[in-house]
Amino acid sequence: MEKVKAKIAPSMLSSDFANLASEAERMLQFGADWLHMDIMDGHFVPNLTIGPPVIQSLRQHSRAYLDCHLMVTNPMDYVKPLSKAGASGFTFHVEVSQENWQDLIQKIKAAGMRPGVALKPGTPIEQVFPLVEAEVPVEMVLVMTVEPGFGGQEFMPEMMDKVRVLRKKYPSLDIEVDGGLGPKTIDVAASAGANCIVAGSSIFKAVKPQEVISLLRKSVEAQCKI
Ligand code: DX5
Ligand code: ZN
């Protein structure tokens, strides 16, 4: 079985949005694998961030993998616009997709993006199993380790049970964690089995972001044993 790879994804929510292209370039120079793009609609979460036009603008300046996390009530409405804009990954929330996840996954794939599913801290992990085991499955599960909506919150270690369950059940699945990740929390997440690491404030507030990125990667490579 192929070993899962470490993917370090700085959350651009913590970047200077007025200089998004240069912030993205800076993160790639510092060793980022993906750029995590938090799309919020002010309805699913009490915050409003960016949408397809901003992804499209960034795409003009960067060839990076744009890991889009849709914190929106109607993810289906974003499939076409985001694929046109040049998104790479499309991760929707299971809480708002109970009725149409099969259709959603198929449309995301047909539009040339990589489908993923996210779950909030209060959502039981069992809810994502059917999506991972479907005929056309999601290719990543994002376990939220804070309540979605804002950067800079405290990591919830109790979410690691979800990661452990997933890793045991699906050895080669991409498992992403998002919220409060940094040098102090990475070992717990990596040893539970997370291989895709989103980090906003711990990277952007660091004096040497490249050192944080490399520390996150080393922890995953050393501890996320598959
Ligand atoms: C929160 C977002 C996260 C956020 C993480 O709703 O999904 O991606 O930017 O930020 P930190 O790493 O600062 O917790
Ligand atoms: Zn996110």
Image: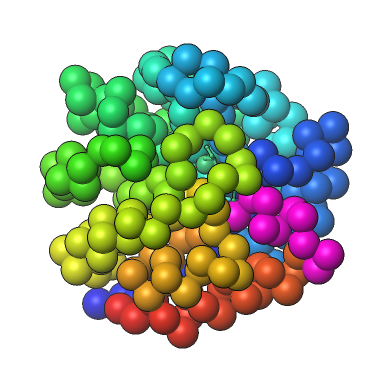
Q: Is residue 217 magenta?
A: no
When asked about the image quadrant of residue 38, the answer is top right
Task: Compare residues 61 and 131 and report the one nearer the observer.
Answer: 131
- How is the structure coloured here? rainbow
For the record, the magenta segment spans: 198-208
Splitting the image into 4 quarters, where does residue 59 fall?
top right
**Ligand 1 quadrant in view:** top right
Q: Residue at x 65, y 74 (%)?
A: 214
The relative height of residue 77 versus residue 183 in the rendered view (above or below) is above
Residue 201 drawn in magenta:
yes
Residue 18 in the figure: left or right of residue 179: right
Q: Which quadrant does the N terminus fall into?
A: bottom left
Residue 81 percent location from the top left of the image = 53, 20
Residue 84 vs residue 208: left or right? left
Please indicate whether residue 115 sits to the left or right of residue 12 in the image.
left
Residue drawn at x 85%, y 38% as measured from the top left: 19
The answer to whether residue 150 is visible is: yes
Q: Considering only vertical position in the picture, is 47 above or below 159?
A: above
Q: Quadrant of the C terminus?
A: bottom left
Q: Is residue 132 above or below residue 92?
A: below
- Residue 11 screen position, x and y as percent: 62, 47
Residue at the (83%, 65%) spot, across then down = 207
The image position of residue 223, as x and y in percent, is 41, 81
| Image location (x, y in percent) of residue 8 | 57, 62
